[in-house]
């Protein structure tokens, strides 16, 4: 990554936490932020998580507060409570749509996006971004060095790009 590369980090908090816990390691969010700040211009580092709003204290609150204070944008929404078919109280909170929409909105303004998650929920989002970056028209920020088009043996967009001065003046 070049030092002037514009980068965005998007972190699916609940899934990354569950995966790290299952694998038996902790994530050093301070070191993670510094690592990507050294790789380019970090435009955004967002952490997405659902929170239980009616509880005065939750186990995630200290992490959310620390992230917010130390340079992350924390994106939250309230969990929803419901009773399942067996009568058990369940709590549900999913931030996938918020993360995906933010990824689509910031994509035109960055060179690289790094997505941290622990499941495959964002496979389609990543696929679409890769296709746009590899095969999209260079004038819209994709296909660096025409690599994608060369791979496909496609000569690219050959339509005229406007009129010459002679054509405009009628000479």
Image (tube, rainbow, N blue to C red):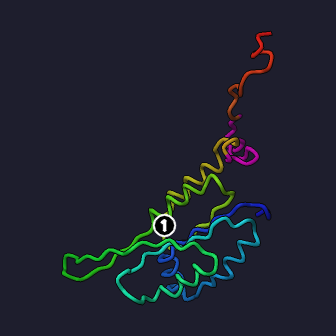
Above/below status of 71 relative to 164? below
Start-end of magenta stretch: 141-155
Q: Which residue is mark 1?
A: 120
Coordinates of residue 130 in the picture (x, y in percent): 61, 54
In this picture, residue 48 sits left or right of residue 31 = left
Residue plotted at (70% across, 29% down): 158
Which residue is nearer to you in this view: 1 or 166? Answer: 166
Measured from the top left, where is residue 102 in percent x and y? 53, 60
Q: Residues within 10 Å of mark 1 (few under 14, many from 20)?
A: few
Image label count: 1
User: Where 95 sits versus 133, above or below?
Assistant: below
Tell which residue pokes out farthest to the top in this image: 171
Task: Name the quadrant containing residue 9.
Answer: bottom right
Q: Is residue 65 above or below residue 146?
A: below
In the picture provided, is 159 more to the left or to the right than 84? right
Image quarter hosting the N terminus: bottom right
Element class at badge 1: loop
Q: Which residue: 80% across, 9% down?
A: 171
When the figure is inspected, residue 164 is found, relative to residue 120, above or below; the finding is above
**Residue 77 within the magenta-colored segment of the rendering:** no
Q: Position of residue 80 (x, y in %)?
A: 32, 74
Q: Quadrant of residue 165?
A: top right
- The reply to whether the magenta stretch includes residue 152 is yes
The part of the image, by quadrant, that contains residue 2 is bottom right
- Residue drawn at 53 percent across, 85 percent down: 63
Expressed as whole percent of the image width and height from the top left, the position of residue 111 reads 69, 57
């Amino acid at each position: 990554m070049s030092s002037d590369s514009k980068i965005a980090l998007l972190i699916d908090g609940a899934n990354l936490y569950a995966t790290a816990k299952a694998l038996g390691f902790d994530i050093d969010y301070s070191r993670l932020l510094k690592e990507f700040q050294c790789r380019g211009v970090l435009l955004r580092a967002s952490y997405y998580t659902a929170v239980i709003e009616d509880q005065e204290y939750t186990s995630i609150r200290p992490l959310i507060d620390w992230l917010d204070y130390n340079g992350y944008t924390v994106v939250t929404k309230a969990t929803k409570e419901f009773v399942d078919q067996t009568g058990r109280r369940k709590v549900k909170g999913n931030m996938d749509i918020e993360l995906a929409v933010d990824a689509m909105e910031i994509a035109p303004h960055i060179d690289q996006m790094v997505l941290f998650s622990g499941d495959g929920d964002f496979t389609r989002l990543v696929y679409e971004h890769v296709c746009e970056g590899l095969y999209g028209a260079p004038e819209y920020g994709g296909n660096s060095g025409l690599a994608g088009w060369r791979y496909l043996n496609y000569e690219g967009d050959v339509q005229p790009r406007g009129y010459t001065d002679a054509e405009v003046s009628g000479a």
